[in-house]
Image (cartoon, rainbow, N blue to C red):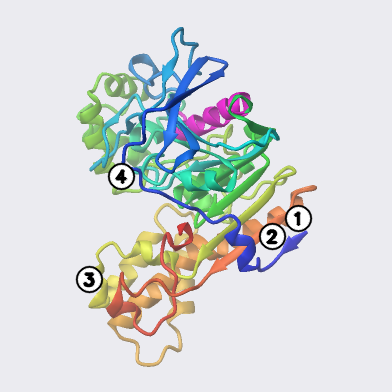
Amino acid sequence: MMRLPVEMKLFSACALFFVFLHAEPTLAQTTVTVQQGDINGKISILGSDVMSYLGIPYAEPPLGDLRFKRPVPKAAWSSPLNATEYGPICLQMNARFPSSEDCLTLNVHVPQNNTTTPKAVMVWVHGGGFVVGSARELDPVGLAMADVITVSINYRLGMFGFLTIADDVKGNLGLWDQHLAFRWIKDNIAAFGGDPNRITIFGESAGGMSVSFHAMSPMSDGLFHRVISQSGIGTQYFVLRPSPTIITSLSKTSNCNTIDSAALLSCLKGKSAQDLLSASNTLGQLLIWMPNMDNEFITGNVESSSNLLPEQYGNLDFLMGSNSRDGSIEIAVPSEAENGYTESTFRKYVERMLFGRLDKDIIETALIQEYTEGVYNQDNRTRAQQLIEIATDLFFTVPTQLNALKHDRTNGTGSTFLYFLSINTCRKLLPAVLAGWSWTCRRSNLH
């Protein structure tokens, strides 16, 4: 049964207790045996109430011939794995921690108490627009204090995780990484004291989109039982097939200088990781590193302008929601926004938001009319506010509500929960633009 809206106390029960992990825990260890072998962990940053197992590889390194291929399950190891330090994060520009192509690891945080009943499990999928972020930066280890085993995962980003070249590389490698990590957790979490039949996957922004795609995917049957999407949901807009111009841009930016798909792939495989990272960052300005319709992991009708909504979600409990001004993500240059937008700049940004949509012209006219018609004393500052409103509704509020309604109608025995967070948190970010407005900005639902 659908429950709208969710009471704040229900959402608080699922609130994220994130901890930035910079301090070094003590060196006490304990050993867990999984299918691949023994793992040594240590006392977490929170103290002896939580044991942490860090940098556990769930896949073979995606190097050499495995670059741009689906992940391969990690083979067994003969000696105990020393899981006392985070592994490298996946390659990205301006990485905050050591990064590498060899990054497919996960972290497990286990409450320590005298209970023998298998514990519920929550698996965090980080956000970052599919180009930045890591399991390390916002590792929700604090949830383990609530007697929940928490897991965070790395997955390939940018070109490494979301390259699409015709039938040679069908894309969604980052989603396949996540899928393999979920399978590893399903198969091994009992060794940590977890209940493989009480697994919740949750994420924010790109992570929220990711878990939504997994909830829709026919590949996910039985891997998890509950889903939480925060400020991110799987929509048709993000899964249109890439146009030929992207292949042309990729060929030029990478200096491969060929649009033959097989030759281009061979060239890219021969490039250094840093060369690919540079090309990935350049092309990322075109918003091309996204999940796409591969008709295997993500299926649907690409001719439709409606959200990608599956006919059947399965028997999953699903909590989803957004913030009142998630669209502030569109304000790339806050100083520019504080001065407001001219009409021509406003229209340019609205057009950019609709990049790749098949119904772009119709939607652009309708959006501008809906959000500007009848506004008294239209000025530059007002247009900046209207741009945030458009982005919020277009990318977050409406898709989330449509998905909630669809899930409620097709979820079998599962329950649907929808939240909308509107506590004012924006003024510190964009004080001149948002003065007098009660808005909740991006990532407010992570606290």
- Indicate which disc residue 284 carries: 4
Q: Which residue is mark 1?
A: 409
Secondary structure beneath dot 2 equals helix
Q: Which residue is mark 3?
A: 336
The answer to whether the residues at label 1 and label 3 have Cβ atoms under 8 Å apart is no
- The residue depicted at 64 percent of the width and 36 percent of the height is 114
- Indicate which disc residue 438 carries: none
Secondary structure beneath dot 4 equals helix
Q: Hey, what amino acid is under mark 4?
A: Gly
Secondary structure beneath dot 3 equals helix
Residue 320's image quarter?
bottom right
Main secondary-structure element of the magenta-colored stretch = helix
Q: Hey, what amino acid is under mark 1?
A: Arg
- Indicate which disc residue 405 carries: 2
The answer to whether the residues at label 1 and label 2 have Cβ atoms under 8 Å apart is yes
Q: CA distance from mark 1 to mark 3?
A: 43 Å
Q: For the C terminus, which image quadrant? A: bottom left
Mark closer to the chain start, 4 or 1: 4
Magenta range is: 169-189
Residue 90 lies in the magenta-colored region: no
Q: How many marks?
A: 4
- The residue depicted at 19 percent of the width and 29 percent of the height is 255
Q: CA distance from mark 4 to mark 1?
A: 36 Å
Q: Position of residue 19 (x, y in %)?
A: 40, 49
Q: CA distance from mark 1 to mark 2?
A: 6 Å
Q: Position of residue 342 (x, y in %)?
A: 26, 77
Residue 350's image quarter?
bottom left
Residue 332's image quarter?
bottom left
Residue 64 shown left or right of residue 416 in the figure: left
